[in-house]
Image: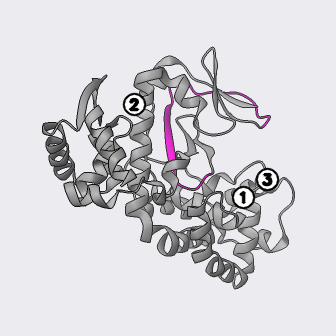
Amino acid sequence: MGWWQVNADTLARSRFVLSPLAETFASLKLLHAGVGRHPGEQAWLRAHLPAYRERLAGDPVTALLVHAGLGRNWIADFLTPTPRDGETFGEGVARVRAVPAAAARAQLRVSLAGPLPSALERTDDLPERAAALLEWVWDGTVRPYWARRRRVLEADVVARTAQVSRGGWAAVLDALRPGTRWLGENRLQVNLHEYPPREISGAELVFVPVTPQTGWVSWEESDRYAVVYPCAGALADGHDRPPVPAGLGALLGAARAGVLVLLGGPMSTTQLVAVTGQGLGTVGRHLRVLLDAGLVERRRAGRSVLYSRTAAGEVLVKAARRG
């Protein structure tokens, strides 16, 4: 197994980061695999897989590049630059484009675990081709959905942050993705591959959620490390949000009733904003009305204020569902 040595200070300074480039590369991986793990991914593939295959059929060199770069046990490093906080997609893909061709070929040999096809050895614009393909994936298959995906990712981050405050980092790390878990003694297992341990104490460590159900690790020299992980499965498909009973919507208004339905378990205002797509002020007004009506209650958990339905709220929602 591959694991990193992480001291307490490094873990305490670590944070969650959203990355449009990581989301795009995860989507490229999903297109390459061609198999969705849940209905949301399957619907997305039905919409975009034919165009992706047509794109590669018309560019055989890029098709070879994708096959080599997405190796069985290793991804070519230049395809997955370590995400940076606040970085736009354009800024991230520019780092892919700036990699020297010789370095890209060397990394492709590692990911392919053998010699490269002659077409890749003869081509000096491999980083440019990779960047162009990522731009194609972003423009046509990710950016149209980015606003909703970003809300889903933000909700995942809020939920994981709350989990840190409740159960510590070990509980969060154990649940990030298969192969990732806290081993104790300052050791973080990052995958199941037999790679040498890495000492990363003192480095910058970020955790990056993506909506496709995939993940990987990346690093820059010895300064910055990232663990990219799939966001919670229930959040990966926007259709999983519980439906609002028509009668409840007529009584409270659809948006306010939707907030009440979501509060079957404790949620913060930030989580509600991320999941519903409503503005902070709008969610706050809904919560105030529901609080005044005795349908929800609030309590503090660490730095967060969590809202949940009261007994009266539960009765109202259950009655509306039966109706």
Tell me which residue sits at (14%, 44%) in the image. Answer: 289
Q: Nearer the viewer, residue 227 or 167?
A: 167
Q: Is residue 145 above or below residue 311?
A: below
Q: Is residue 221 left or right of residue 166?
A: right
- The disc placed on residue 162 is 2
Mark 1: amino acid: Leu
Query: Which class describes the residues within 10 Å of circle 2: few (<14), some (14-19), or many (20+)?
Result: many
Marks 3/1: CA distance?
7 Å
Q: Which residue is mark 1?
A: 70
Look at the image and tell me whether residue 300 can be seen.
yes
Q: Is residue 236 above or below residue 187?
A: below
Q: Which residue is mark 3?
A: 72
Tell me which residue sits at (33%, 47%) in the image. Answer: 319
Mark 3: amino acid: Arg
Q: Earlier in the sequence, mark 1 or mark 2?
A: 1
Marks 2/3: CA distance?
35 Å
